[in-house]
Image (tube, rainbow, N blue to C red):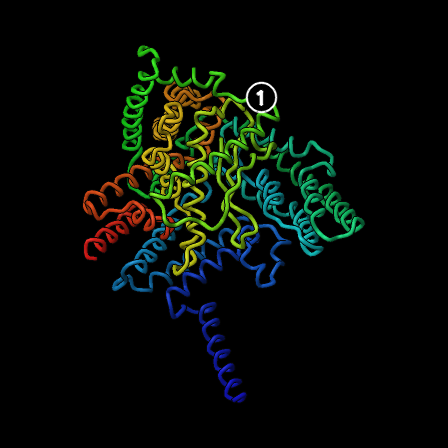
Amino acid sequence: MWKWTKRGLATVVVVGAILIINAIWFKPFSIRVFYDRTMLDTAMNSPQLLTQLRILEGFGFRGHNAELDNLSPAVRAERMDKLRENYETFRSYDREGRTGQDLISYDIFDYFLSTMIEGERWQWHGYPITQLSGVHTNLPSFLSDMHQVSDDTDAEHYVSRLNAVDLQFSQLLEDLEIRTEKGIIPPRFVIDAVISQMETIMEPAPADNMMVTSFAKKLEQTELTAAEQQDFLKQAEVAMEVSVYPAYRRLHTYFVQLAPLATNDAGVWKLPDGEAYYAYMLKQNTTTDLNPDEVHQIGLSEVARIHAEMRAIFDQLGHPADVSIGALLQRMNEDPQFLYPDTDAGREQILADYTAIVDDIYTYIDPAFRSKPEAGLEVVRVPQYAEKNAPGAYYQRPALDGSRPGRFYANLYDIKATPKYGMKTLTVHEGVPGHHYQLALQQEMTGLPIFRSFMPFSVHAEGWALYTEQLMADLGFYENDPHGDLGRLQAELFRAIRLVVDTGIHAKRWTREEAIDYMASQGGMTISDVTSEIERYIVWPGQATSYKIGMLKFVELREKARTELGDAFDLRDFHDVVLTSGGMPLDVLERLIDDYIADKKAG
């Protein structure tokens, strides 16, 4: 009996070895193995992504936690070559004969890889360092939020990462210098903001920098002795002095010297072949072939429609009909009944109220959802060093191993930018059932290729989150709360205005000031919010159009299913189909819903 067991085990090992060798060095026997190999290859190229996902720690592998991503142009060229090689291998698998989710997977993968390869033409376009994102601000938040410290090995890895900052920033500078030579220079306001951010990060003494103070808090939660903790903190301080601060100073000097070369022109039309670049960015972010004029017109039409709905509510509330919608919204922004005190206590209350709203949402959503994520959701403040130029709110996925919940980050820099009447809708969008439901459930999917759990499509994720804002109104969330409903409509108006200003800036050559004036007058937002939003669109061309374009498609497909299925339509079924399939291009999403309708009719 034991002999046969050993023989069987040997057979399994040999077969397993053959499969592993095939998957690594040759075209895999199965397209599913190919998908997983490509996903693993991508993840293995990013030690910081591996830290965020925490997919290797469970197998005892932690060495990647001592490294930072390689940002050198040479490595990027190697990865592009690998991408083309992977796409060639992928296309050798036949599409014909595939059905259902197998065909959906094929078409999502095809679209994503082909679009990435198409984008090689624009690899030097875009701005790696901006007031919103970039290594200079991402590094502190990554070390604080993502790098876990549970023992001495994790602590050693943390210090190793600090010592690796100098090399990573050198690689980044090599990339930036190539862009400068090609005339890819951000607007002056971006450069000024980046310089200010770096000065803020470098201002404290090494021991007081948040990259060290957050490390100290992590060490306190371990079983390391006080002496061991102090030794690691001393190593971290030395790393700050010899690696981190010198790296920041060189990057700071680069931007100071770049500033005189910059202009105030906001749109990417100013870049080499800028009009074609913007067309590509619209395609990438909407997964459609809509041109800038079409997107602009959709925006103007939606602004007019939403204004009409808001006017009806303002009329019911007794507001004067001869005052513009933007002006009425601005009055609401200044109304003391909707404002928190500009104090630490006021900010703490905002976070507590957001958490209470999450709890309230759960009492409304059962008629619309069966599938719910296992991961929890917490509301936290945007880090103070980044909040001045950060968006009003954003969402962060939970860790795969359950060690970190999903997080709804609220920006509390300008407390007047958080009026009470808009908080319900922001919680829906960033939390439940918006980003948290869609993205956490996407990570928790089973039975599909692993890339389906992480494939990013802004038009799907942001379209879903905006769609849920209207959905919650349909579920009665704003019943007897006209001001809350105005907050919802203002949020939708905000996304419609984005279609107008994004295309205005990048295709119609609007100035930064023209875009700010339009958004402020039409949307009634605080000027601090408007300014940070317009500056976001300037550095992320096309991304802001994904919200409304995606939402319109979700609404269209829901109504299509409702019309064709009649009494057989169940909103929970529709949402199950969407949420258990992950992100995808809009044309693939439409085919998924068509299949659902056909199956429902046949069954």
Total of numbered circles in the picture? 1
Q: Quadrant of residue 435?
A: top left
Which residue was labeled with disc 1? 342
Would you place residue 313 above or below residue 125 in this image? above
Question: Would residue 196 appear left or right of 268 to someone viewing this image?
Answer: right
Of residue 239 and residue 318, the one placed in the foreground of this image is: 318
Which quarter of the picture shows residue 497? top left
> Residue at horizontal 66%, vertical 41%?
247
Quadrant of the snapshot with the C terminus? bottom left
Q: How far from the left and from the top, in percent, is residue 33? A: 41, 65
Badge 1 marks a residue whose secondary structure is loop
Characterize the local packing of mark 1: few (<14), some (14-19) or many (20 or more) Cα atoms within 10 angstroms.
few
Q: Is residue 185 visible?
A: no
Q: Which of the pair 281/80 is nearer the observer?
A: 281
In the displayed structure, 295 sits above or below 95; it is above
Residue in the foreground of this view, choosing between 186 and 101: 101
Reply above or below: 457 against 527. below
Can residue 41 be seen in this snapshot? yes
Vertical arrangement, residue 278 with respect to residue 83, above or below:
above
Could you tell me residue 529's position as x and y percent? 47, 25
Looking at the picture, which amino acid does disc 1 mark? Asp
Residue 159 position in % (x across, y down): 69, 49
